[in-house]
Image: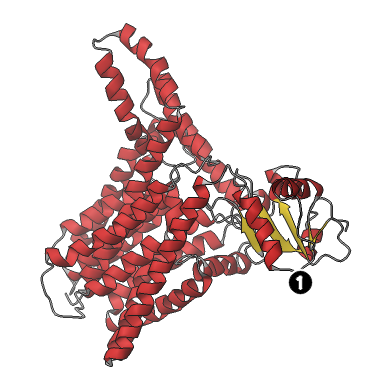
Amino acid sequence: MSIPEAESSERPLRLSMVLPVLIPWAVVLGIAVAGIDFGEHFDEHYMIESVERTIDREVLLPGFYNYPSMLYSLCLAALLPDATATLAQNPGLGRERIDALKPIALEKIHTKGYTLRARVVSAFVSSLAVVWVYLLVLVWRRKWGEALLAAGLMASSWEVGYHLRYIAVDAVMMQFGALVMLLVVAYLRYPAQRWLLWAAAIAAGFATSTKYPGGLLILPVLAADAMTWSGRGDWAKRATRLVLLGVTFAAAYLVITPGTVLEPIKFIGNVSYEFKHYKGGHFGHTVAPGPQHFMKILRYDTLDMLSPYKAIASAFFVLSVAGAICALRKTPKIAALYIALPVLYTLYFTMQRVMFVRNLTLAAPFLAVCAAMGVGALWAMWSNKVWRGALAAACSAAVIASVVWQAEAVSTIRDRNTVRFLRDALAYADAHPNERIFTPAITHERLAAVRASLPSNLVTDTASATQALFIWTDGFPDGWQTFPANIPRDVVAWFGPKATNFPYATAWPEEMIVVTPIAWAREHGVRGITP
């Protein structure tokens, strides 16, 4: 077995090497919880309704399989404090007690407190991705500085940060994806520890029970087993182990999503709907499969994933490519297995006609790990202390700047029901006096209510306008089905609560103010603009 491919001395992992992960973990969880009361999310009701069905039917099944049942299980866990308190206040057993408690439980799950608690549970589980990324780099590279940077990039990623808050499957699956790859890499470094492989199969099953495309995660588990074979060996024994790993994976999935076999008709119907949905398109999120979808994904991964600042995000993306190349040269087997998974996952979604950026969060841990290795490669190349100091300072400043940006984003969430964003829009107009900015009638009235004397470059006729500034629902009054989406190149600026990356998710149920080129607004039929 030649797999271990050590890159540095085999120093044992000490507690002092592991403890630094508590800093980025506390940061990401703290920011997530600080912004947890962000208003509504368009998909959260599916999980809450699943819990409601369980209580109403008295059957521990969600009756909903468009998503697997891990998130449903987390939502049930969020109900435990209320359930425990209610049971303590109503001692006794029997049918009468159940009938008395059901309406209480049904009332609880429709309270704001329950929703916020379910979000916190989801955020906590998802935030563990930061820990797994740190440990993965530590196990693979034995360099705590690289591990801390990888974890820091995860903690400072706004894309990771806001997805953590949702009662949604994507960030939870991202966490399981990071855990699977940690266990796989650890197994490849220490093949005598076979329990790591079985644990990876279980984690892959849990990932699939969170989001169906997570089934791809069984592939690196099976490949890791095959990569440790040496010589001719007993092929029947090897094949049996692969089958048993597959059975373990399936069992872990079924433990969480038993409705696959207990409610097969409902399961097949729901999953078939999602296949057709992604093949057919989804209003403004519809894209052409293949090159167009791939380029949109690449743009998002490059300019958005690792930082809210595009320059920082793109720099770390380039470093992630460099880090992947260096890893392929130094530890080719581990690196090839590690990199193959996000490539396959991206190709799978490239073939779909629907682009939701939430589907892409799985890539965040892989990009963060590879970016940290890219920085590590530069560190190894530069022996000069000044250059190394500059590199460390630049990386630290980039991560801190992104964290500070997220803290400011939390303040916008808390101000979502104020006139702050109308004032921000007016400040934008003040700062761009050379732009002639068209505003539709309703938007104009709302701005005038905040400031009586509007900037002179805000106009209500389009003849000389260079830009359009409008409340999104004022510009597109016919409903979210008409909203263009995935339009970061077309949005010059936007003002509103930063609970989502709005240019990608334009159906967000909060009032947003958007600035676009006038040509784009005219092309897309923004209200008040003549063709």
Neighbourhood count class around disc 1 (C-alpha, 10 Å): few under 14, some 14–19, many 20 upward:
few
Q: Which residue is mark 1?
A: 434
Q: Residue at x 41, y 37 (%)?
A: 116
**In the rendered image, which quarter is residue 143 located in?**
bottom left
Note whether residue 191 is visible: no
Position above or below: 499 against 521: above
Position above or below: 32 against 401: above
**In the rendered image, which quarter is residue 187 located in?**
bottom left
Q: Residue at x 18, y 73 (%)?
A: 230
Q: Residue at x 44, y 42 (%)?
A: 167
Q: Picture coordinates of residue 129 (x, y %)?
A: 33, 57
Placement of the N terminus among the 4 image quadrants: bottom left
Q: Picture coordinates of residue 506 (x, y %)?
A: 63, 51
Judged from the image, the secondary structure of the residue bearing numbered disc 1 is loop
Q: Nearer the viewer, residue 352 or 395?
A: 395
Q: Picture coordinates of residue 45 (x, y %)?
A: 51, 35
Note whether residue 409 is visible: yes
Position above or below: 293 against 170: below
Residue 187 in the figure: left or right of residue 436: left
Q: Nearer the viewer, residue 183 or 172?
A: 172
Residue 290 in the figure: left or right of residue 80: right
Q: Residue furthest front?
A: 453
Inspect the image, locate mark 1, and give the three-letter code of the amino acid beneath it.
Asn
Q: Picture coordinates of residue 248 (x, y %)?
A: 26, 48
Q: Nearer the viewer, residue 65 or 138?
A: 138
